[in-house]
Structure formats: structure tokens, C-alpha cells
Amino acid sequence: MIFLWYGKTVNIFERLLKKDGKRFELRSIIWLSFTIIAATATFLMGISFYYRFSKETERTILEGNSAVIEQVGYNFGVHIRNMMKVSDSLYYSVIKDNDIENIFNSESLKVIYDINKDYIESIELFSYDGNLLECIPTGRAKENVNIKNEPWYKSTITGEENVQFGMPIISKTLKSVSGEYTRVIPMSRVVQMNEDGKSVKGILLINLKYSSIQDLLSDSLYGDDSYFYLTDSEGNIIYHPMQQLMETGNSKEEYIDLRSMQDGFFIDKSDGTEKEVFITTVGYTGWKIVSVTEGDGIALNTFKNKLFIAFLIMFFLSAIVILNLYISKKVTEPLKELEKGVKEIEDGNLDAKINADGFYEVWSLSRTVSNMEETLKQLMADIVTEHEAKRESDLMVLQNQINPHFLYNTLDIIVWMIENEKSDNAVKAVMALAKFFRISLSKGRNFITVEDEIEHVRSYLTIQEMRFKDRFKYTLSVDEEAKKLYTIKLVLQPIVENAVYHAMEFMDGDGEIIISAKKEGDDIVMTVKDNGCGMTEETVESIFKGDMVSSKKGSGVGIRNVHQRIQLVFGEKYGVFISSEPDEGTEVTVKMPAVTAEKLDKRGLK
Amino acid sequence: MKKKYSVFFIADIIILIFLLLASSTDIFVNEKEGEVYNICVFTDCYKDGHIDNFRLGVDKASSAYNIDLNFIYLNEYEKINEKLNMVTREIENGCQGVLLACGDDRTEEEILDTISKSSIPVVLYNGTSENAAAKGTVGPNLKAEAELIVSNIKQNLPINERIYIFEYENSSEYTKNLHVFIEQKLIECGFNYEKITVEYKDDIHSEMDKIIRHNLGSIVSADSMALENIGEECDYYNYDVFVCGAGWSGTIRNYIEKDIIKFTVAHTAYEAGYSAMGKIICNIENRAYDKINEISVKSAVVNNENLYSDEIEPIIFPYS
């Protein structure tokens, strides 16, 4: 069951503290660990102090109680000794060897009685066989009193001690005053007197007021849960604050066998409740004063004190938890800001502001990350710029690979035509050449309309037709839809050039080159188809690989050049696609996305 | 999550406030003795030994139960109005409970009527009343006492002995009721009896003179004052007559010692006083007191032989 609850508690904590149920947050770890450590330390210290303080308090209270009871015992002992001194004084100063007639006429006797009448009820002198001889105060003695059957008399006669103390009794020898009864403690002794010149024994009885003992012990109470009681050496109760109720059965004092108990302190649990009991013995009489303190009398054990301790523990625990929450929050907040900023950077936002402040290390880390972000931004910009420049450069280089050969050849033709007075053709050639180059340059633009690209090819073929007289015919067609679309310039001419030089090489006037351009979906498809000698697959592959050995007319660089330029701009999905059958012919397809003027502006490709 | 923290925080504050208030104030937990109860004891009974012992029990209960006690002897006031005024004054001074020991039924009813207006609980000592203010009674079992008296008479006297029952005109209702039970018991046992009601002490003398001179019979009285007067008569005139009864005082004790009064029946008035105070506290606090409205205390026969015995001493000579 304990393990089950432990497991459940751990699960609750994990649910509360784990981020996304996977990992503990740093803040949770900090406050939980600080709280546990501080709470454990506080709890242990609190318990230690409580027990130490409790023990010290108990010890102090015990010492105090012990001092009180010792004082009470001392006071009581003093009282008893004083009474014994009175008895001694009476005996040795007044009674001993004195005539009976003179004894009670003695002024000393009256003085002794008067001085001590707060504690003494009466002083009575009996014959040895128990007949009352005299009594002070006079007139209080009953008539025909005989005390032979009284327990105190018997113990006086038989006892070893000089002075005997008896159990409290209602005095039978004294008349009641105003109907009141007198409870006394008989203090008696055998005395030697003179009667008619003979030494006779008698019994001196001094009735000690029970109320004086009662006052001595009841005034000594030191708390609502504490009381004293007095017993003889056998444990018979002489005085108890609840004695009357005990006599009538309405109250009970748990019997403690005091006969064998030493003086001192012990805990009594005989009636199921814890009581602290002190015992001290009064000298001479052997009487025992017993102090009883109920368990709850000890201050720290009260319910309210326990509540207060619970309050203290809970207060400090709450303070620790709140403080640790605050501290952990303060420590981890900048880290969270930093984490947030880094996450934004991770998501691609290089303009994210990292405002983490707080501890030096976090601030420093935040500055470093910000700087890193700036550097990253700069590097990425540089890479983009370089990439663009490289692309531009590559494009330009690729383009520049095409132009020189054709110029030379065309100029040769023109010169020949002029020399052979074929001026019309020369003009046609020159005009075609001019158009060819105008379109080639296109004011430095890399993109021209499909219409211009077809015109460019047308110009080329016009010139080539003049060169390769009637070796082939050609057709050019372009969809209206495709005309206004844009293409990378000089993509068809190299392909047509290859068709002219390679495909038509062995054709005798039945060669045909068909060039078309149309829009297919979102793409432009330009086709150059011939019925020439065709190519093997290996040849086609080698063209794109660049393995082609340079031939006398061309090196296939043009097709690969076109393919690379297209892919450089538009990606690998587009480019040049060759379908060829040896002796059948070749179809070269150039595929590009359909780019309008607006798209061109947007992509910044113009 | 924030809402959960707020809930915990508020709960924590509430618990802390509760613990602080509970540990430092008396709002929730009161470990102290409890309030001090203001209780008045009114008595206009003859101040015999029973009343003295009753007072001792009441005083003991006062210290045990944290009671601010006013013990008032109404017999110091002659007129009923003066007595009622005293009662009213104490009620106005904040009396919360009353223990009433009244010798006279009429006075008892008038006092109860006065108190009933204020809904203060009243416990009667040696009394009975149908008044709603009276929440219970404490005292001896009169039938049992009558039984004790008559059985001891039977043990000591022949069946043809005539028994004279003495009472004063203003004897308490307890006395008169006990005499009624004694009469019943005497009839059951076959004794002849005669009740003599006197007005003054001198009347006792004249009546006793008659009885003694003509050896008419024996005397019993449950009136402490009457019993004392009878004993005094016997002591003074040396009458040899069987005298017994119920009641207790130092004088009765002396006559028992002298064997003038053969025996008396006494009850534990100390316990009656102590128990009565406890019952009043329970009524004030609206607690059940063993669910008993009548509390009977023990009675015993006291004679010359057992006067100072361990069994009798707690009844007639209680520790204070």
C-alpha cells in the first residue's frame, strides 16, 4: 500500500512538473529539489528542536515540580517537627516528674497552647488506662471519656517511637462547638507524671488540627492538573483533596503501593492516562507526600501547542515553497527567453529578437546567440549572393560557348556571296545574321519570348539553308499561346545546329527539320525533330555526360549547355530530352515552365 | 496550471489562518477551564448538620466546576416578599442556575414562579415540584428512610408500643412527607401511632410531659430541630424514653453519644450538594446528566455504636 501511494505521488509530480510529459523543466527541478532539501532540513530541525525543547521543558517542569514537592515536604516536615517540639516542650518542661494537679495549672502549658492553637485543637492528658485527666481548652472535654479502644491509644502503648502520630479522627473527647465536629490528627506519647508522690505513666495527647495540614497541602497546588495527597507509610490516605468523594465512591485515586516506593519521580499509567508522580517522605512519621500531575499538564503536550507547531511547520514549508518558486522562476525565466529566441531562429526567423536578461551567464549567452544570429544572417546573404553570381556567371559562360563558330562561318558565306555577286542573298544573310545577333544579345537579357527564340532559329536556319544548299528543308511553328511566353535565350539554336550538322549531314535534299513550340499545361515544350541518321542510346547518354569527343562540326556542347542552363534556372525537372533511333531520326524536346512576363519580374530573372 | 497554483495558494492561506487562530485564540479550541458559572443556592431550611454538610458539598463542587457561588440563607428574611426580592436581585445580577433548599412548599413554589420567568434551571434539595423551572431533585429516598426508621423501631420496641410522631407546624415538606411514609410503614408493621404537631418549643415540653408521665410510648421525629428539642427535654428532665428519628446536627450527635437519642437516620448531604451542583451545570450546558431527574443519596442509621465508624463517618462527618 505504501509503495502504491508512493508510486501515485511520483506520477502526480511527474504530470505536474514534466514538460509535455517527457522531460522535467529546469524550473521544476530547481524548486522541487530546493524545496525538498529546505523542507527536510526545516522539518528535521523542527522535530529536533521540538523534542529537545520539549524534553528540556519537561525536565525543567520536573525539576520545578520536584523543587515544589521538596519544599512542601520540607514545610510539612518542619510543621511536624514543630509539633513534636511542642510535645517535647510540654513533656519535659511541664509534665515530666510534675504533679498532675500542677500540670494543667501551669502557665507554661497555657502559653504553649495559646502560641500554637492555630495548629493544635486541644491538649489532653490521660491516665495510662485511658481516663481523661485534663484538657485544654478547659471545658471542652466530654465527660466520662475513655480512649482505651482508640487505635491511637493502642499504638501509643505498644509503639516503639516516643511520639506517635495517628490517622485523622473525629475527636471523641471534645465537645462540639456550635454543633461542629472536629477532625484531628492525634499526636500522643507516654509520659511520666507524679501522682501523690508516685511516678505514674500517663498519655499525653495533642490533637493537631486536621485543617492546618489540609491548608498546608491544598495551598501548595501548582496548577489545575496537579494536586498533593498525604499517606502514612502503609499507603493509607491521610489527606486527599477529593477524600470525601473517594469515601462515598464518587472519585477514585489509583492505588499506588507506596510501601515499596522510593522517594523520587515516576510515571504512573495504571488508569490508562499518564500521570507524573513525585513522592517524598516526611521524616520521623514515615508519611509520604505524593504529588500527581496529569499528563496534559505539561505545557507542550496541550492540543493547542501541537496546533501551533503544525502552524509553524506549515508556515515555513509554505514560505520555502513560495520562495523557491520565485527563485527558480527568476533563474529560469531568462533561460526560457533564450530558449524561445533560439527556437524562433531554428524555425527560420533570423530577425528574432533575443531579449534574455538576468544572470550574467544568461545575458552573455543571449548576446552571443544574437551575434551568432547576425553572423548567420550575413553568411546566408553572402551565400545567396555568391550563388546568384555564380549562376549568372555560369549562365554567361555557357551562353558564350555558343556564339563564335557560327559568326565565322556566316561571314564566310556572305563574303562568298558578295564575291559571287549574289547581293540579294548576301543582304538576306546579313539581315538574318543581324537579327540572329540582335536576338542573341537581346540587350543582355537572359530571357526572351518564345517568338523571338523561334525568330532566332529562323534567322539561323536562313543562313544555314544558304550554306547547305537544298540539303534540307525546315518548318517552324509556334502556338499563339506560346508566343508571348518567355524562354531562356539560345536554347533551340544549338539543338537545331546539331540537327543541321549531324542529322542532315548525309541527307540529299530529303532532310527535314521540324521545329515547334507550344504550351503544354504549365510548361513550354519546344521540339526539334529531324529525320536524320539518329543516335544510339549510348551517344545520347554521352552527350549529357559530356563524354562526347569533339567532332569536326560541333562537340554536343550545345545540347548539354542548353540542358545545364535550363536546369540551372528551373531545376532538374526541366531541360533537354532526346529521343532518337539510328537511321530513323531524332526528336529533341526542350521543356521549361511557362514563364510569363509577370513571373519573370517576380522571380527577378530578367 | 496557474489556476491550480492559485487554488493551492488560497487553500494554504486558509489552513494557515485556521491553524493560527486555533492555536492562539479560543475561537475554535478552548482548552481553558471554561466559563465561570454563576450559581445561587437559596435555603430557608433549619440550619442543621445536614445543611452544613450540604454546604460543604456545594463548596467543593464550586471549586471543582469553576462556579461563582452565592450561598444565601433566606431564613434571615422573615417575609416572603423579602425572600423573593433577594431571589430577584440575584437573577438580575446574572445568576445562571439555582439550587433551592426550601423547607416550605409555598415558599418553594413562589420562588420557582419567580425564577421560571427567566428560564434559569433550578434543582431542588429535598423538594418536589411540578413547576417547569425545576429540572430535578436531589435528596434521600424518603421511603427508604422511613423503612430504616421503622425497621429499627421494630427491632427495639414491642409491637404494641405507641409511637408519637412529633413535628412543628412549620416543619419542612421533607419532614412532613417522611412522616407520612413513617406512618404508612408503622401501619404496615402493626404499630399504633399518633402525630403531634406543635407550634412552639414549649409545646414539645408539655406534650412530652404527658407522654412520659403516663408512659404512653416512644417518640420519633424527622425534624432535626424537634429531635434536638426532644433530646434537650430528655437530657434536662432525665426522661427515660425511646427517642429516634431522622436528622443530623452536633446536638443530635451529643444526645446519641449520651444514648438519649437511640438512633437517627442521616443521609449524605455532602454528596447531595456536590451532585446537585453538577446537575445544574449540566442543565446550563444542556447536557444530559445520566438522564436522571431525581438523584437519591445514601441514608444510614446512626447510633451510639457506629457513630464514629468508618462506614458512618463519611455520611455525618464529611471531609471539607
Image (tube, coloured by chain):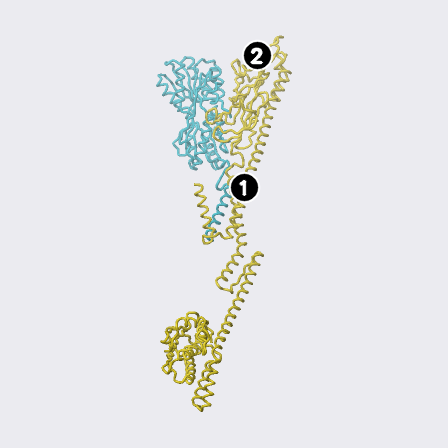
Chain colours: A yellow, B cyan
- Subunit ID for the residue under disc 1: A
Q: Toward which corner of the image does residue A219 lie, by quadrant?
A: top right
- Mark 2 nearby-residue class (10 Å; few <14, some 14–19, many ≥20): some
**Observer-nearest of A124 and A509:** A509
Q: Toward which corner of the image does residue A165 lie, by quadrant?
A: top right
Instruction: Indicate the position of residue A382 as horizontal and vertical percent values.
Output: 53, 69
| Above or below, comparing residue B189 to residue A45 in the picture | above
Q: How many marks?
A: 2
> Mark 1 falls on what kind of element?
helix
- Residue at 47% from the left image edge and 13% from the top image edge: B238
* Amino acid type of the residue that numbered disc 2 sits on in the rendered structure: Ser
Point out the image quarter for the N terminus of chain A.
top left
Instruction: Indicate the position of residue A162 as horizontal and vertical percent values.
Output: 59, 16
Q: Nearer the viewer, mark 2 or mark 1?
A: 1
Q: Toward which corner of the image does residue A107 lie, by quadrant?
A: top right
Alpha-carbon distance for marks 2 and 1? 75 Å
> Mark 2 falls on what kind of element?
strand
Q: Which residue is mark 2?
A: A127
The disc placed on residue A217 is none
| Above or below, comparing residue A138 to residue B69 in the picture | above
| Above or below, comparing residue A489 to residue A145 in the picture | below
- Mark toward the start of the polypeptide (2 vs 1): 1
The disc placed on residue A44 is 1
* Left or right position of B184 against A565: left
